[in-house]
Image (spheres, rainbow, N blue to C red):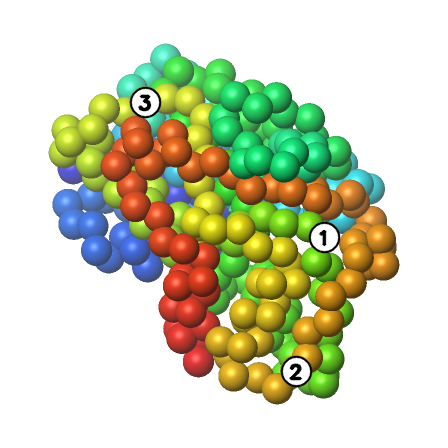
């Protein structure tokens, strides 16, 4: 029975992997978060991996506070890079397949067409630099697959959808930036895609292809469009007003454009990706 270890399993993606794992039989799932397995502790990570001998590791653990990372640079590096290196070194030379999740923040945000996997990385923030360093660390192992994603949300944890819902319930109007565009990703869709990849490799339907991939939902929108749709889907009576990002004043620079080209992952692993609007509808239905 294939052993699948999930690290950082109490976060958005980890929780969605827990939910979707119920639909995948015949695998031995080990869900861990910092309490059971602190991946930033080198010997702890190596001991846990040597003892449990996973056939697959999916790393959902991360330091995701984009603004705070500008001052907590060491902490961001520890979780987003050193911890990834600990995993990669523990499995180096083995057949264990490693799926590590990364971000659109490895790009500079200045493009006007979707980023494919060959686009040069050029992170503009401490968070982006720590995630790029983590990608390089994951690649110390030959059987590693990096999945970059963007604008992740779910019913779990803190995210844009939950922030907008909370604010829209309390206010008559909200200001949201309209000059940054990208694509939302429902963590449940990404979790299902990851499990579909793992199960089709195990069942020999597709070959495992190490390397970097992009995954988000289909479509493009601005944060303003996204917020408008959230408020509408939830049936709330709150006006969403467009503002410029320079009026928002975030600590860390946000990408103007962060749309990911998903062709490679769709073609390699025969995936169908839902449009962001239909996935948002499902997520909001779940939350009702
Ligand atoms: N959120 C986004 O908008 C977004 C966008 C693009 C890419 N991504 C990437 O997508 C992946 C999944 O993100 P997510 O939103 O699901 O993350 P998340 O909700 O922040 O979950 C991360 C989990 O990792 C845990 N963790 C932190 N340090 C750890 C350690 N040393 N050992 C083990 N677990 C540890 C966290 O615990 P604590 O909560 O206690 O710290 C948390 O439970 C990450 O790689 C992230 O960088 C996210």
* Residue behind mark 3: 209
Left or right: where 274 falls relative to 101: left
Q: Secondary structure at mark 3?
A: loop
Relative height, residue 13 to residue 112 (above, below): below
Q: Residue at x 39, y 33 (%)?
A: 263
Q: CA distance from mark 1 to mark 2?
A: 21 Å
Left or right: where 82 falls relative to 67: left
Left or right: where 252 falls relative to 120: right
Residue 86 visible somewhere in the drawing: no
Quick one: label 1, few (<14), some, or many (20+) residues within 10 Å? some
Q: Secondary structure at mark 1?
A: loop
Sequence-first disc among 3 and 1 = 1
Image marks 3 and 1: residues in contact by CB distance under 8 Å: no
Quick one: label 2, few (<14), some, or many (20+) residues within 10 Å? some
Q: CA distance from mark 2 to mark 3?
A: 46 Å
Residue 224 visible somewhere in the drawing: yes
Quick one: label 3, few (<14), some, or many (20+) residues within 10 Å? some
| Residue in front for this viewpoint, 198 or 117 | 117
Farthest front residue in view: 112
Query: Which quarter of the picture shows residue 121?
Result: top right
Q: Residue at x 57, y 24 (%)?
A: 119
* Residue behind mark 1: 179
Left or right: where 283 falls relative to 3: right
Image marks 2 and 3: residues in contact by CB distance under 8 Å: no
Q: Secondary structure at mark 2?
A: loop
Q: Disc number at residue 238?
A: 2
Relative height, residue 195 to residue 77 (above, below): below
Query: Which quarter of the picture shows residue 7?
Result: top left
Q: Nearer the viewer, mark 2 or mark 3?
A: 2
**Which quarter of the rendered picture does the C terminus lie within?**
bottom left
The x and y percentages for residue 11 are 50, 54
The x and y percentages for residue 286 are 39, 73
């Amino acid at each position: 029975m294939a052993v699948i270890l999930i690290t950082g399993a109490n976060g958005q993606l980890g929780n969605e992997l827990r939910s979707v794992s119920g639909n995948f039989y015949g695998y031995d799932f080990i869900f861990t978060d910092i309490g059971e397995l602190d991946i930033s502790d080198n010997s702890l990570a190596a001991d846990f991996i040597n003892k449990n001998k996973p056939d697959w590791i999916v790393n959902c653990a991360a330091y995701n506070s984009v603004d705070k990372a500008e001052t907590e640079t060491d902490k961001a590096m520890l979780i987003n890079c050193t911890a990834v290196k600990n995993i990669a070194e523990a499995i180096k030379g083995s057949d264990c397949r490693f799926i590590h999740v990364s971000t659109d923040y490895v790009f500079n945000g200045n493009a006007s067409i979707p980023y494919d996997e060959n686009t040069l990385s050029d992170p503009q923030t401490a968070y982006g630099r720590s995630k790029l360093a983590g990608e390089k660390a994951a690649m110390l192992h030959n059987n590693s697959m990096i999945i970059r994603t963007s604008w992740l949300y779910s019913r779990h944890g803190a995210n844009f959808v939950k922030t907008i819902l909370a604010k829209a319930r309390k206010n008559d109007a909200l200001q949201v930036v309209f000059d940054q565009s990208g694509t939302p990703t429902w963590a449940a869709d990404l979790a299902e895609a990851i499990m579909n990849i793992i199960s089709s490799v195990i069942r020999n339907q597709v070959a495992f292809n190490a390397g970097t991939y992009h995954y988000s939902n289909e479509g493009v929108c601005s944060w303003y469009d996204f917020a408008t749709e959230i408020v509408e889907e939830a049936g709330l009576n709150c006006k969403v007003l467009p503002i410029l990002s320079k009026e928002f004043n975030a600590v860390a620079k946000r990408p103007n454009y962060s749309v990911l080209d998903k062709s490679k992952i769709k073609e390699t692993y025969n995936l169908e990706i839902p449009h962001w609007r239909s996935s948002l509808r499902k997520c909001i239905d779940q939350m009702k």
